[in-house]
Amino acid sequence: MTSLAVVLTESASQYPDRPAVRHDDRVLTYAELDTASGRVAALLADRGIGPGDTVGLMLPNVAEFAVAYYGIVRAGAAVVPMNPLLKEREVAYYLADSGAALLFADAAVREHAQAGAGSTDVVLVDAGFADLLAGFEPVPGFVPRSDDDVAVLLYTSGTTGQPKGAELTHANMRHNAAVSATTLFHLGPDDVVLGCLPLFHAFGQSCALNAAVCSGASITLVPRFDAATALAVMARDGVTVFEGVPTMFTALVRHGATADVSALRIGVSGGAALPVQVLTDFEEAFGAPVLEGYGLSETSPVAAFNHPGRPRKPGSIGTPVDGVELRLVAEDGSDVGPGEVGEIAIRGHNVMRGYHGRPDATKEAIPDGWFRTGDLATRDEDGYYVIVDRKKDLIIRGGYNVYPRELEEVLYQHPAVAEAAVVGIPDDRLGEEVGAAVALRAGVTATPEEIREFVRDRVAAYKYPRRVWLVDALPKGPTGKILRREVTIPAGVTA
């Protein structure tokens, strides 16, 4: 029996004086992070919160996130990470559905946090938070938990209906952090990870925060990503590992390496498919290889990666990580043949225990021990997986399957295109027509007709987008992932 908290307590024992968490001028050593999180555990124990309880955490990327996160886990409770941009209704839903007994919230979101909390106690994390914690003696060690106990209750993005809480266990989170830190990123005490991924998301938690902490590395936090700020922090703190979603890589490429990022040794991309053009442009501009991987909230999140020391295949998500299996299945659950498109199914130490309070949804997602992801892919002769698209994003035009990601890859090759999203437009004759929303690079011009013809010359006739429109920016989720489902189709753009 052990706990996710061991990633901190062991590193604090080995590297007490090394920096653990940075946020601008504020630095917490491992000893300081250990002590502060121990005080949070004591605060929770004083309020009768422990094993079997859940605690909300509604903070941006600041040092207090790590303090509260590890404190909650040390107390034996489960963390419910929440986007600090949530409004009253959403806060109420997360807290009620998870049964949270307490909410740690950034003072800047006081109004929505307190209004949504109802009967749930709220601890506002502001200038007085340190004074509050000082009144408690730090709890030594942590409350033991079994591998199958829930450490984090992570709510999915809710692309279909209300968000569901994925129950991620202590074993899920420990293994995912260890795999990320060792076999994938080769992290050590001298590494500095840029923490610009939201820590309330699985990618930021496992691959940045927990992976850094279990390695004795340092994580330097950026509460709100923009290219200029990220580059300045990378230069100031000697960042060696940059982790981001594709839109972050795109922003850095567009901005250019205007600061000294010579310490950078690796880029890590996940959360969505990274266009090959963006990958190659980043590597050329920043002189560091990019490892592209794949995972979901329900898989803690890492499931597959382009591994260091093995051939990288741009455009692929690589091969399964240690202890994880992937297969491609048809609608009936049977395996698809070589080169055929199938839905990715995952089995391993990373798969969630289930959806909180939703046994039927859990059975649907994991009908036979294999988690159905909803992502369509192919597998090549070397065992590398290539995402074709989300099952629900597939466009069927006149009986032909059109995969938005394939067309987006082509769109990103156009010199004027900064971002693109391909969507289906309802059509009485064909069922669906192909449309593309495009944001242009700053200072560059192009017409929808030019962009449409660019794609038309590079794909089969049934695939290219008949409707192309320009936008200032594309809708994005909290991690910066482009949300196709929220793309607005202009009134004049019809099939």
Image (tube, grey):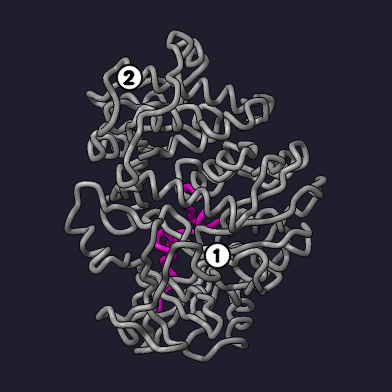
Q: In the rendered image, which residue does mark 1 sit on?
A: 305
Up-down: is 228 above or below 247? Answer: above
Up-down: is 350 above or below 173? Answer: below
* Mark 1 or mark 2, earlier in chain: 2
Q: In the rendered image, which residue does mark 2 sit on?
A: 45
Q: Quadrant of the N terminus?
A: top left
Element at badge 1? strand
Give the distance between the C-alpha atoms of the residues marked 1 and 2, in whole angstroms: 39 Å
Residue type marked 2: Ala
Q: Nearer the viewer, residue 297 or 213?
A: 213
Q: Nearer the viewer, residue 110 or 439?
A: 110
**Part of the protein shown in magenta:** 473-495
For disc 2, the neighbor class at 10 Å (few under 14, some 14 to 19, many from 20) is some
Q: Nearer the viewer, residue 249 or 434?
A: 249
Residue type marked 1: Phe
Q: Residue at x 52, y 15 (%)?
A: 127
**Is residue 302 something that shows in the picture?**
yes
Q: Which residue ends up furthest to the front in the rendered image?
A: 1
Residue 104 falls within the magenta-colored stretch: no
Q: Residue at x 51, y 43 (%)?
A: 198
